[in-house]
Image: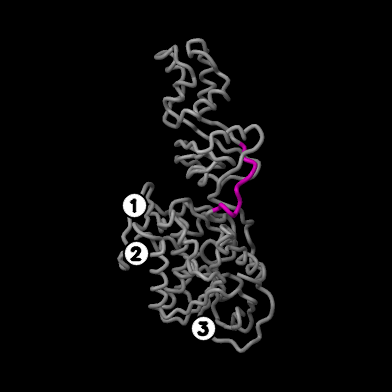
């Protein structure tokens, strides 16, 4: 968004509230506040409003999830999101979508998508802003942000503006090609707000060394249970030329830390001892052949090679087969990193929730300063949860403007 420090002393246009960021949270907040009778200005250095919305969900925008609950979010304070999520629900946003005549459908795991284009959601938000008389200024970097005598003064482009309320909705640094930056963190530090160390989330993981052998499986996908930390997800995993991706891996990436292993259960529906049972029913089969009956052939071949169990099952002891079964249900891979913010859908970390009111998203020690959306240390699971946090946090902040 630009620098947050130099002076802006020009005669300023005045507003009731200024929102920095024309993304999901910022537009929602501005629209609601505008329709509550507030004079609102939205500023964004991008030339396009809602840039991340447009590319989301493969261009169809996974705009919410009907299973939204506080336990679907990662935060240093797992209870922080509870208030906003309870007061503005997926049903509330869906009612808005339907009021605008946008057709939608539910995919797996409670995910709601537009039938048409994600641009419909952006157009809806812009229409809601227009109904509230919101002014939107795009394509101008912010030169300065100052606070004094109960007013926030913002210098951007050739203009200077002021308001008693400032909403920071500039997101995190994920997907920098769309103009994403760490501006929210710079601004938070300017106002001496703590920032939980940000890192890429919902992001592919990379493998190196011996585990790079799995790169030969690039393009192979299978349903697994993937776990990191205390979290585990049953969805598809995809092997890539750099490591691991797919929904299950993107989910655990939000919980994974450098140096830790990711646990993969390649056969989540198989009970303990299933290889010994296969030996009794098909003694002449091989580990590779029984794996190939349940997994993609290339993956089955690679796993059998790594298990180093050759020959017919009849010639392998039950103990060796039991150990192989344990490895297949708890295969440890140790990623050496992630594909970074360029491929990350969101950012874990951000402005500390300890600094903010869970009711209004206002900074406790800086009156009139609100932080919403991805800029806050609240990160949802894959599947529409981050959009619901954007809508809910934007709505909650707007009630206090």
**In the picture provided, is 115 more to the left or to the right than 389?**
left
Q: Nearer the viewer, residue 358 or 127?
A: 127
User: Would you say the residues marked 3 and 1 are in contact, meaning their CB atoms lie under 8 Å apart?
Assistant: no
* Disc on res. 382: none
Residue 239 on the magenta span:
no
Q: Name the residue under label 3.
A: 15
Residue span colored magenta? 334-344
Mark 3 → mark 2, Cα distance in angstroms? 28 Å
Mark 2 surroundings: few (<14), some (14-19) or many (≥20) residues within 10 A: some
Q: Quadrant of residue 334?
A: top right
Q: Where is residue 79 in the image (x, y as percent from the top left)?
A: 50, 56
Of all residues shown, which one is farthest toward the top?
315
Q: Given this view, does label 3 or label 1 mark the residue nearer the observer?
A: 1
Q: What element carries label 3?
A: loop
Q: Does label 2 or label 1 sit earlier along the sequence?
A: 2
Q: Is mark 2 on a helix, strand or loop?
A: helix
Residue 338 on the magenta span:
yes
Tell me which secondary structure the magenta stretch mostly adopts: loop
Q: Mark 2 points at which residue?
A: 97
What residue lies at 40% left-to-right and 54% top-to-bottom?
65
What residue lies at 58% left-to-right and 70% top-to-bottom?
364
Q: In which quarter of the image is the N terminus?
A: bottom right
State whether residue 24 is above or below residue 165: above
Mark 3 surroundings: few (<14), some (14-19) or many (≥20) residues within 10 A: some
Q: Quadrant of residue 370?
A: bottom right
**In the picture provided, is 121 more to the left or to the right than 3?**
left
Q: Name the residue under label 1.
A: 106
């Amino acid at each position: 968004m630009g620098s947050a420090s130099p002076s802006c002393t020009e005669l300023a246009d005045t507003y009731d509230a200024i929102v920095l960021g024309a993304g999901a949270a910022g537009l929602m907040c501005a629209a609601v506040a505008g329709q509550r009778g507030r004079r609102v200005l939205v500023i964004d250095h991008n030339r396009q409003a809602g840039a991340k919305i447009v590319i989301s969900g493969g261009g169809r925008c996974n705009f919410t999830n009907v299973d939204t609950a506080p336990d679907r979010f990662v935060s240093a304070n797992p209870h922080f999101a509870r208030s906003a999520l309870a007061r503005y629900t997926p049903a509330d946003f869906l009612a808005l979508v339907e009021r605008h005549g946008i057709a939608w459908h539910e995919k797996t795991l409670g995910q709601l998508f537009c039938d048409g284009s994600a641009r419909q959601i952006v157009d809806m938000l812009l229409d809601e802003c227009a109904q509230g008389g919101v002014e939107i200024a795009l394509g101008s970097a912010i030169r300065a942000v100052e606070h004094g005598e109960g007013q926030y003064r913002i210098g951007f482009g050739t203009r200077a503006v002021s308001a008693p309320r400032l909403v920071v909705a500039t997101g995190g640094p994920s997907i920098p090609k769309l103009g994403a930056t760490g501006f929210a963190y710079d601004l938070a530090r300017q106002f001496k707000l703590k920032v939980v160390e940000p890192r890429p989330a919902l992001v592919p993981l990379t493998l190196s060394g011996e585990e790079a052998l799995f790169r030969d499986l690039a393009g192979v996908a299978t349903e697994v249970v993937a776990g990191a930390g205390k979290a585990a997800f049953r969805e598809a995993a995809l092997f890539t030329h750099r490591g691991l991706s797919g929904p299950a891996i993107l989910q655990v990436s939000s919980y994974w830390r450098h140096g830790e292993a990711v646990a993969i259960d390649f056969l989540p529906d198989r009970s303990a001892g299933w290889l010994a049972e296969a030996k009794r029913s098909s003694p002449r089969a091989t580990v590779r052949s029984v794996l190939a009956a349940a997994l993609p052939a290339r993956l089955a071949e690679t796993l059998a090679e790594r298990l180093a169990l050759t020959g017919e099952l009849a010639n392998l002891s039950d103990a060796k087969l039991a150990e192989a079964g344990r490895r297949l249900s708890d295969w440890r891979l140790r990623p050496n990193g992630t594909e970074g913010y360029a491929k990350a859908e969101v950012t874990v970390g951000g402005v500390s929730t300890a600094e903010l009111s869970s009711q209004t998203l206002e900074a406790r020690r800086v009156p009139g300063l609100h932080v919403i959306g991805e800029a806050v240390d609240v990160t949802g699971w894959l599947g529409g949860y981050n959009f619901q946090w954007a809508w809910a946090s934007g709505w909650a902040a707007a009630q206090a403007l």
